[in-house]
Image (tube, rainbow, N blue to C red):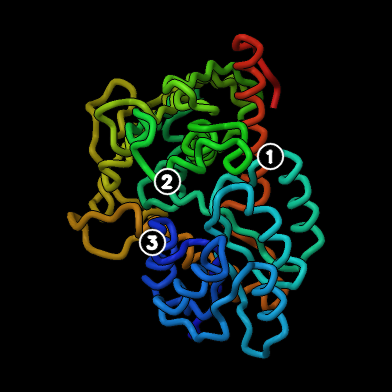
Amino acid sequence: MERIRLGMVGGGIDANIGRVHRHAAWLDGAFDLVAGALSSTPEKSRASGRALGLAAERCYGSYAEMAEAEAAREDGIEAVAIVTPNHVHGPAAAAFLERGIHVICDKPLTATMEQAQALERAVRASQALFILTHNYTAYPMIRQAREMIAAGELGALRVVQVHYAQDWLARAGDSKQAEWRGDPARAGLGGAVGDIGTHAHNLACFVSGLPVERLAADLQAFVPGRAVDDNGHVLLRFAGGVRGMLWCSQVAVGHENGLSLKIYGDAGGLDWSQEEPDRLWFTPYGQPKRLLTRGGAGATAAARAISRVPGGHPEGYLEGFANLYTEAATAIRAARHGSRDLGLLPGLEEGLAGMRFITACVTSSAQDATWVTL
């Protein structure tokens, strides 16, 4: 099929997340990157565009210039990937949505709830699609876990435990990427809870099929002088009385990208770790633990549908992003005929839920971990 013309805001040649999105968009051949406003300064933006092989006239100095120019072209972009610091998400997305250009935006939705509400208005007023890249929802064994729970294989759910632990911010000044993440004006009020806690919250809700209704949070900034949290412990109450706990930390020495999810019902339990993404442990009550693998004999249709290579050949982070981009391409092609169905893709509602989660965590922690309703 004809490839979808894609633009990118942010993600210049030296930005890791830009490379991730570009590889993901390329992997299944659904997109062509043809335009970009790739940095916060016009000079860097145009230099990055040239380095990526974009035509000179489509290397823009700002997202506003890019949105106006691309909307006026007969061969203008159909979709844009926004991979900037959080405070740019809202205004950049709105600039393209109001011109009918589909948006694929990195999470969290925005830096503040006010920006989120403004973006919500822009999404609802536009005929274009808005997609949020919670990439972990597109791992094959996560889709299988969701399918198994929906089919009742765990029985009535009781407990959801989700952890996301990293150590790359354990000391001040360790990473250039930490600079904007520690600035509330650009990242928002949530530090670790906004950066990785939103992933953990989204994953728990996606797999369980349940929203979080209330929470009590204890957030800390362990590194002296840090203006936002770098560690958080959160008690969760899901719909239907299901209990949960979320731990997110970017100062947990020894953890690289330790995202894990455990869900327990009255008939069984599931256990998954992002660092072994092709494995899902399933324990029916009173029976031996079973190892289910992507591509193995126990793989379900949901897992097989987004697997690329035979079992035993690991798939993970890039492929998860690529699955989102491929599903986004399907949704964009369907939108040409009037559809607004995102399928399992995260979108505005998931983004708003993430913003409510961040806000509730910060509010609760400021009130000595009191319970807050989302």
Question: For this view, does 373 lie left or right of residue 288?
Answer: right
Given contact means CB atoms under 8 Å apart, are the residues at marks 3 and 1 in contact?
A: no
Q: Position of residue 252 (x, y in %)?
A: 33, 25
Element carrying mark 1: loop
The residue under the point 45% across, 64% down is 12
Question: Which is more toward the observer, 83 or 261?
Answer: 83
Disc nearer the start of the sequence (3/1): 3
Q: Residue 331 appears in which quarter of the rendering?
A: bottom right
The answer to whether residue 260 is above or below residue 134 is above
Element carrying mark 2: loop
The residue under the point 67% across, 60% down is 93
Disc nearer the start of the sequence (3/2): 3
The residue singled out by tag 1 in the image is 112
Q: Which mark is residue 14?
A: 3
Measured in 3D between alpha carbons, the distance from the residue under mark 3 to the one under mark 2, in whole angstroms, is 11 Å
Disc nearer the start of the sequence (2/1): 1
Given contact means CB atoms under 8 Å apart, are the residues at marks 3 and 2 in contact?
A: no
Name the residue type under label 1.
Thr
Q: What is the total number of numbered labels drawn onto the structure image?
A: 3
The answer to whether residue 366 is above or below residue 73 is above
Q: Residue 102 appears in which quarter of the rendering?
A: bottom right
Name the residue type under label 2.
Gln
Count neighbours of disc 1 (C-alpha within 10 A) and say few if under 14, some if 14 to 19, many if 20 or more: many
Given contact means CB atoms under 8 Å apart, are the residues at marks 2 and 1 in contact?
A: no
The residue under the point 37% across, 33% down is 169
The answer to whether residue 226 is above or below residue 302 is above
The residue singled out by tag 2 in the image is 177
